[in-house]
Image (tube, grey):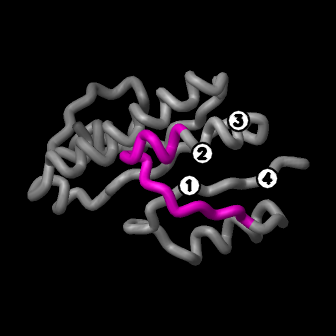
Amino acid sequence: AGYSVIVLDNFVNSSERALQRVSEITGKEVERHELDLKDLEKLRGFFHANSSRILCVLHCAALKAVGESVQKPLEYYENNIGGSINLFRCMKETGVKSIVFSSSATVYGIPSTVPILESFPVCATNAYGR
């Protein structure tokens, strides 16, 4: 209701169709910027230049292939954790205090029952879930 959607993405793990769906759902064109969250200076520049336009962040950027995360755990940690830390840092610097963090149930490992509840013990079985 009156808000714009701005997407920052390096586009290595995303789909044009997903962005089209966001446009369909919101009824607005999605503003797209190719930017890697690991690049702190570019991210910082974007946040400082656009701080008056950013009220909330929906963070769902991550590498997410479980099998690949086992083969390349450091790459996953650098991207998923390092990129998130850079994002949080830029949010703090520019006074953006609202975030919706899209996570994964993979942190619970192999659940004994479904649906998985947030009260279940954390038991990640791969780098993506750690």
Label 3, label 4: how far apart the Cα atoms are: 13 Å
Which quadrant is home to the C terminus? top left
What SS does tag 4 mark?
A: loop
Task: State how far apart marks 3 and 1 are (Cα).
Answer: 14 Å
Against 55, is 31 above or below?
Answer: below
User: Which of labels 3 and 4 is toward the front?
Assistant: 3
**Label 4, label 2: how far apart the Cα atoms are:** 16 Å
Which residue in the protein does label 4 denote? 4
Q: Which residue in the rendered view is the most extreme toward the left? A: 71
Residue pictured at 70% horizontal, 62% vertical = 31
Q: Earlier in the sequence, mark 2 or mark 1?
A: 1
Q: Secondary structure at mark 1?
A: strand
- Element on which disc 3 rests: helix
Spatial CA distance of label 1 from label 4 is 13 Å
Q: Nearer the viewer, mark 4 or mark 2?
A: 2
Instruction: Give whichever of discs 3 and 1 has the lower sequence position.
Output: 1
* Left or right, 96 with reference to 3: left
From which residue to which does the magenta span run?
30-44
Q: Is residue 69 visible?
A: yes
Disc 1 packing (10 Å; few <14; some 14–19; many ≥20):
some
Amino acid type for the residue under numbered disc 4: Ser
Residue marked by disc 1 = 8
Decide which of 5, 89 is in the foreground and name it.
89
Crowdedness near tag 3: few (<14), some (14–19) or many (≥20) residues, C-alpha within 10 Å: some
Among numbered discs 3 and 2, the one appearing first in the sequence: 2
Labels 3 and 4: the sequence-earlier one:
4
Q: Which residue is mark 2?
A: 46
